Structure formats: structure tokens, C-alpha cells
Amino acid sequence: MRDLPFPARDANAIGGADNLGNLPEWDLTDLYASEDAPELDRDLNWLAGECAAFAADYEGKLADLDAGELLTCVERNEKINTIAGRIMSFAGLRYYQMTTDAERAKFLSDMQEKITIFTTPLVFFTLEINRIDDDVLKAHFNSDAALARYEPVFRRVRAMKPYQLSDELEKFLHDMGVVGDAWERLFDETIAGLTFTVDGEELNFEATANLLTEQDRSVREAAAREMAAVFSDNIKIFARVHNTQAKEKEIEDRWRNVPTPQTGRHLSNDVEPEVVEALRDAVVAAYPKLSHRYYELKRKWLGLDVMQVWDRNAPLPMEDTRVVGWDEAEKMVMDAYNAFDPRMGDIASPFFTKGWIDAAVKPGKAPGAFAHPTVTEVHPYVMLNYLGKPRDVMTLAHELGHGVHQVLAADQGEMLSSTPLTLAETASVFGEMLTFRKMLDQAETPEQRKVLLAGKVEDMINTVVRQIAFYDFECKLHAARREGELTPDDINALWMSVQAESLGPAFEYMDGYETFWSYIPHFVHSPFYVYAYAFGDGLVNALYSVYESGSDGFEDKYFEMLRAGGSKHHKELLAPFGLDASDPKFWDKGLSMISGFIDELEAMED
């Protein structure tokens, strides 16, 4: 069953204004009409019965099945995943709409507990798959093409074979999963329940973080200092959550004899550790020519001797402060998608008309933005916190790209549609790039072009430089936690150790900035998730350079890549484009695009 999503960006909210037009809300009835829907009861009852029947039919027998019987077993497991995923998608999406609502939180918790109980007897499935002899499995694939289609699933499951525990321990860990989920919910509810007072106005986290993009520097400073104060007041809760989650991971990794804290993420991403390290090393080596160089330019544009952290996402002095209404944002993104290929526009269109997007900022709503694929027999849902600045348009383009990808991959079925995180950002970042290029082509003055370029560079720095700095922070955090309990000051020090290195000498750091690790959801929900953003950005930059070169049949190859979902390894997916992510020089291609934009900005200064 898929993990539920969480806001998938560097959680610095962006936007800010009223009168945005008619913002869409989710219609979740394609999942279930309500929490009392008879279809939900029907599915819960079916799930309870089918999980028990599946265990009775197959436990202890997988190694003795012939190819046809194994295919039936896999298809039954896939149906269980689909029904469980549908229930959890409904419960999770309702919760994210209002995380402070006790009834929604209880409903989500109740569904998680029920499904955990139902599915605990199924833990044997992956354990016994790993006990099937390699030659037997190969013979099954050779004799049954329908079963062979699932080979990538078997390969990814069997990657965990060296770290597998006894059946009894695996069931115990499965049952204990709801405890880890409770710590995640504590984090979510704490963030959603925080209040910040800026200039006498009480705001939630999203609205306060949005003030960091205001033209008025005093407003940005007030917001940053208030965030620091509120985070500091709650720092013990955040430190407890991080300590507990990291310790839980350390215990499981130790029992499994997993070599590093990052290994599990690399395996789930279907990516080799050396590829991730090559990416990390390439980005860190590029800090001086990327973030350091750009922020020095920005410091001059802002007319400052030194930048403070509240200047990092500041608009440029010449930036247009107009509000982009929802209808205009929809047109900008749809025009860009249709210009690339009308097929992309056709897939994206229903999101705007059928209640597949929840756009407005509302009290208690989860911060950030995400696209959740739900299950392959329904459709994705996109969540935004749309407040009307140009960067919000880019977030719409990004999340809609995820949605398009998820729709195309759905034909693979439940077990093959889900894309590793490293490739899951492909369509989203590509959609963003299409929208950016469209806006750049329409720029009427050098100033407009400069603002667009600077905004894109900042987004890329947030996606590449900042996420790799986050990854380094997590590596340090988990390594330090293995030596013992971490105080809030210990975690603060680890955070600051990566900030100056990644942002560069243009910055000075206010007292309190050391607590800003506390609001990043990925550290809690998905350890080491963050490098996937840098991976995706670098991959798309290289891919886009192939597209710009006029490569024959690029659009068809691109749609085929998205349709593949999780059925192919990154080497197979990129080969038609002449790209290879395992080549260390591959990452330099992506980074050189960012560097080239900074070159153009520097040239405008002459």
C-alpha cells in the first residue's frame, strides 16, 4: 500500500492576496461519498475477509506455486492493495483538508489501525517471495508473459532480501507501524495548530511563511523573527519527534543489519548509492558557482551590505507585485502544456473541471502542495495553497505535472504504476520548465526577463542546492542520533553547519534561524526523501536540453517514459534520450543549465 503524501516542496510557502477568483475544492466522491458511505463499509468488510483468505490460501506455499498460480496470487495481492489504498487515500485527503479537525484525525487513525490489522497476516507475501529460488522464478517468468510483466516488482522486493528478519519479527514491525504514524500526526497537528502574530494579526504557518516573499523588508523581518520565536517555544516537541523517529529507524536498521541510514531510501528509489553520492558531490562542488554567485547578485540588487535570512526569498525591487488570479494561472499553465503537446493538455484539463484540485488556503489545511495518485482505478488529486504570486503558478505547473504522470502511469496497474521518488519528479519539473519557458518568451522588457530568470534560478536553487543541504543535514542528524539522544541545541548546530556552506558568504544569520529545521515535513514523514528533488531537477534539465536540441520524436518518447511508471529502471527510461544518470558527467549537464541562467543575469549587469 502506498504511503500517503505530504507537501512536496521546500516548505517556504509562497503567495499572498485576496480576490483570486473561484478557487476549486476537492470532490472526493470518486473515492467515497462520505465516511458513512455503504461502499466504504463494503470495502472494509471485503478487505477483512480477503486478507484472511489470502493468508489461508498462500502462506507457506509460494515457493511451490507454478507460474499461473503465482500470477493469480500476485493479482489478488494487487486487488488488496487497490482497496486498501482507496480507503487510505480518502481518509488521508479528508484529513489534509483540515488537520486540526478531531473527527477527521480520528477517522484517519481508525482506518490506519483497521487496515494494519487486516494486512498483518499478509506480511508473509514479500518474505516468501524472497525465498523463491532465483532459477525457479526465472523459469516462471519465461513461461508466463503475464507474470513476467511483474518482474520489476519482484526485483525491488528481492532487493530487501539481505535485510529480511524472521516472519514473526516482520509482523511485529508491521503492527508497530501505527506508532510511528502517531508521531507523524503529532508533527502535522503541531505545525497546523501553530499561530504567529505579525503586526498585530494572528496568522497560521502558511500565511506567515508567505510574508517572507513580501516587498516590504520590515514585514519579512517581522515574519522571520516571529517564526523563530514560535519554533523556539515549540522546539522540545519537534526535537522529541525527530529523536524518536531517528531512533526508531536506527533500531530497525540495526536489527536488519542495513549498512547505512540511507540504504532503505536508495532501495525504495531503485537507485544505486554511488549515483546519489555522485549527485550530492556534484551539487556541493557547484555551490560556489550556483547559490553563492546568485545570492551575491541578489545582495547587490537589493542594495544590501549583507543579506539576512528573510531576504532569501524576497522579490526583486523591480518585480511586478500584481496578483495572478486563478483563471489566469490556469490559462498560463494549460497554454504551456498544450504548446508542448495537445495530449498533455487533454490529460490536465479534467483537474480544473472535476474537483481534482483543492487550491485555497484554509484554517487547519496542511501546508505546501502535493499530488496524490490515490489508486489506479480512480485519479490523482492535487493540493495547493494558492495565494496568487507568479511562483504559485509554477507550483500549479509542478503539481499538475505529477498529476499527468500519475494518470499516464495508471495503466500499469497498482503494483507497477508507482514511480520511485527519483523519477517521480520528472513530469512535475518538466511541466514547470515548460511554463517558465512560455512565460520567458512572453516577457516584454529586459526587466521582466530578468525577474523571470531570477525567479527560476531561485526555484532551482531551492530544488537542488537547498535539498542537497537538507540531505546532508539528515545524514548528520541520523549519524549523531546513533551516538545518543540529541538536545534541541544539538540539532540546531547540525542545521547551521549546512546552511552557511550551501547559501554562501552573502548571508548573515539571525538568532533563531537555527530552529528552522523544525518545520520541514520530509524529515519526519520520509527520511532522505529530499535528494529526489535534486535528482529530478538535474534529470529534467538534461532531458530538456535534448528537447531543445530538436530531437526527433521527443514527445512520443517522453509520453512513453511517463506511461512506464515504475516498470523500468532509470537506465532503461533514459536510454532512448541518450542519457545515463550513472555517468558522473550527467549531473554537470543539469547544473550547467542553472549556471547558464546565472551567466545571463550577470551579463545583464554589464
Image: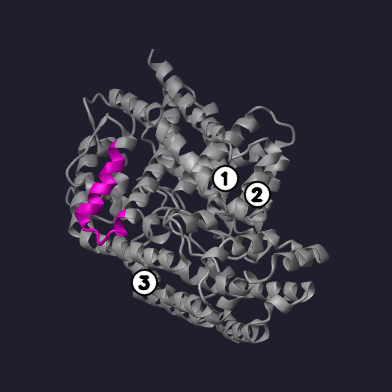
- Residue 173 percent location from the top left of the image: 45, 75
- The residue type indicated by label 1 comes to Thr
Q: How many badges with numbers are in the image?
A: 3
Out of 442 and 293, give the one closest to the viewer: 293
Is 498 in the magenta? yes
Q: For the residues labelled 1 and 2, say whether their Cβ atoms are less than 8 Å apart.
A: yes
- Residue 72 percent location from the top left of the image: 74, 75
Q: Which residue is mark 1?
A: 426
Gap in angstroms between the C-alphas marked 1 and 2: 8 Å
**Residue sitting at 49 percent across and 48 percent down?**
532
Gap in angstroms between the C-alphas marked 3 and 2: 34 Å
Q: Earlier in the sequence, mark 1 or mark 3?
A: 3
Q: Which residue is mark 2?
A: 562
Gap in angstroms between the C-alphas marked 1 and 3: 31 Å
Question: Residue 329, can we see it?
Answer: no
Out of 127 and 351, give the one closest to the viewer: 127
Q: Which residue is mark 3?
A: 182
Q: Earlier in the sequence, mark 3 or mark 2?
A: 3
Question: Residue 473, can we see it?
Answer: yes
- The residue type indicated by label 2 comes to Leu
Mark 1: which secondary structure? helix
- The residue type indicated by label 3 comes to Ala
Location of the C terminus by quadrant is top left
**Over which residues does the magenta segment extend?**
480-500
Q: For the residues labelled 3 and 2, say whether their Cβ atoms are less than 8 Å apart.
A: no
